[in-house]
Amino acid sequence: MAIPTPVNGQITDAVTQANVKVLGDAPAMAMGAIYQSLGHSTGILYENATSSQQQLAIAAQAATNQGVIQIYSVDTMAGAVAAAKIGQSDVPDTLMALLTALRAGTGSIA
């Protein structure tokens, strides 16, 4: 029992025992808080990993699509380059002169 005080001894014993109980529960409460924090951090880690996998899958699909588009456009690009070269040469002028001469001679070419 505690030292005699003006307060009833049973009250001081109850307060003392409550304080001892709080001190005894402190390590368990601290470990509980640590485990809760660890569980939360691990959950966020897995969420971020899943998000990264999804983003990488989307990037892989986009890269594959771009590769396929480039493979399919090889002939188109070659045709575009050839048309640009023809457009820069004197062939269009020659063809226009030929068409004008044909129209003047026959009158039936559209």
Image: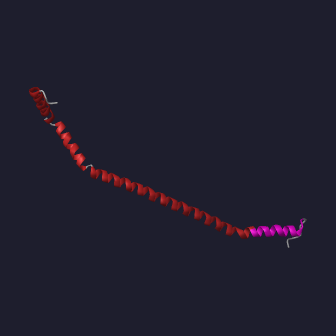
**Quadrant of the rendering where the N terminus is positioned:** bottom right
Residue drawn at x 12%, y 33% is 94
Residue drawn at x 24%, y 46% is 77
Residue farthest to the left, as pictured: 105
8 or 59, which is in the foreground? 59
83 or 100, which is in the foreground? 100
Q: Is residue 95 above or below residue 79?
A: above
Horizontal placement of 96 versus 54: left or right? left
Q: Is residue 43 above or below residue 66?
A: below
Q: Is residue 13 above or below residue 96?
A: below
Q: Return the x and y of residue 19 as percentages of the image width and height.
A: 77, 67
Is residue 94 rendered magenta in the image? Answer: no
Q: Is residue 87 above or below residue 54?
A: above
Q: Return the x and y of residue 42 as percentages of the image width and height.
A: 55, 63
Horizontal placement of 20 versus 1: left or right? left
44 or 31, which is in the foreground? 44
The dominant secondary structure in magenta is: helix
Magenta-drawn segment? 7-21
